[in-house]
Amino acid sequence: MRAQKNLRFWSWGIKYNAQWGYINAAFFNQTIEGFQSNVFTGAGFNLANAGEQSVDGVEVDVMLQPTERLSLGVSGTYLDPFYDAFVGANVGGAAEDLSGTKPGGIPELTLSLIGSYDFTIMGMDAWIQADYRYDKEVDIQDGGDQSATNILLETTGSRTREVGLLNASVGIAKNGWEFRVWGRNLTNDEYLITWFPSVAQTGSFSGYPNQPRMWGASIRKSF
């Protein structure tokens, strides 16, 4: 049986636009009562009615345009998530009371940087663009030090996730045609997106890694 969710949310923000760019900022609080959580039963996962989860946050987004061709952007998010009430949570296959702890997988700080430069070459529009994302280190799953599984995975370096991704691309366009060369995860950052107890394999765990460093090219035609 699913409990009815009750969402409470408030926010306060400011916006400022100018010839050189803009600044947006917001402060907010969100509380969810009766949120759903996956509980591992040993043979699979079932949805369980949880208690209350809340988060206080701040978001800032800044875009600068020093010249007509150059754009620079930075954005950041600070989150303080909290389980106000979470009795019967699944932690590594065992039931725990996580009331008063922080949810796993939600970084306290996220930063994004982006820069792009537009120019012309041989009569074609061209550009260079790069972006970087940083997520502060965080436990991948719930439980913190209450979870024996978290402590076990700490010895293998799999307990936490810290993200530092760099992407870049360069391209040209003319007469509706666009050619782009790109690279993703150029720093070859490696981390687990999530992990969980393996179904019907007591003591074993499975996880999903992030995408490795990738290179590529693409051609597109607009009609």
Image (spheres, helix red, strand yellow):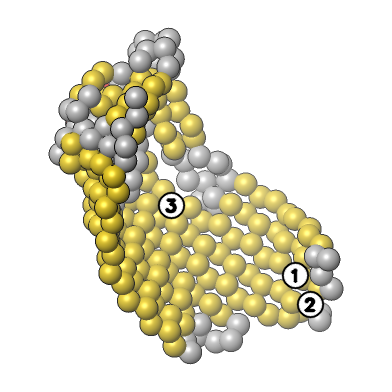
* Kind of residue at disc 2: Met
Element class at badge 1? strand
Three-letter residue code for mark 1: Ile
Mark 1 is surrounded, within 10 Å at the Cα level, by few (under 14), some (14 to 19) or many (20 or more) other residues, namely some
Q: Nearer the viewer, residue 22 or 112?
A: 22
Residue at the left extreme of this rendering:
100
Q: Can you say whether 137 is above or below 112 in the image?
A: above
Give the number of callouts. Answer: 3
Element on which disc 2 rests: strand
Q: Earlier in the sequence, mark 3 or mark 2?
A: 2
| Residue at 50% from the left image edge and 39% from the top image edge | 210
| Helix, strand or loop for disc 3 | strand
Q: Which residue is drawn at 44% across and 37% down?
A: 193
Quadrant in which residue 199 is drawn: top left
Would you name the residue on which mark 2 appears?
124
Residue at image position (84%, 73%) is 175
Give how far apart the Cα atoms at labels 1 and 3 are. 28 Å
Q: Do the residues labelled 3 and 2 touch (CB within 8 Å)?
A: no
Q: Where is residue 186 in the image (x, y as percent from the top left)?
A: 55, 52
Give the crowd class for mark 2: few <14, some 14-19, many >=20 residues within 10 Å.
Answer: few
The residue that disc 1 covers is 172
What residue did someone put label 3 on? 164
In the picture, the quarter occupied by the C terminus is: bottom right
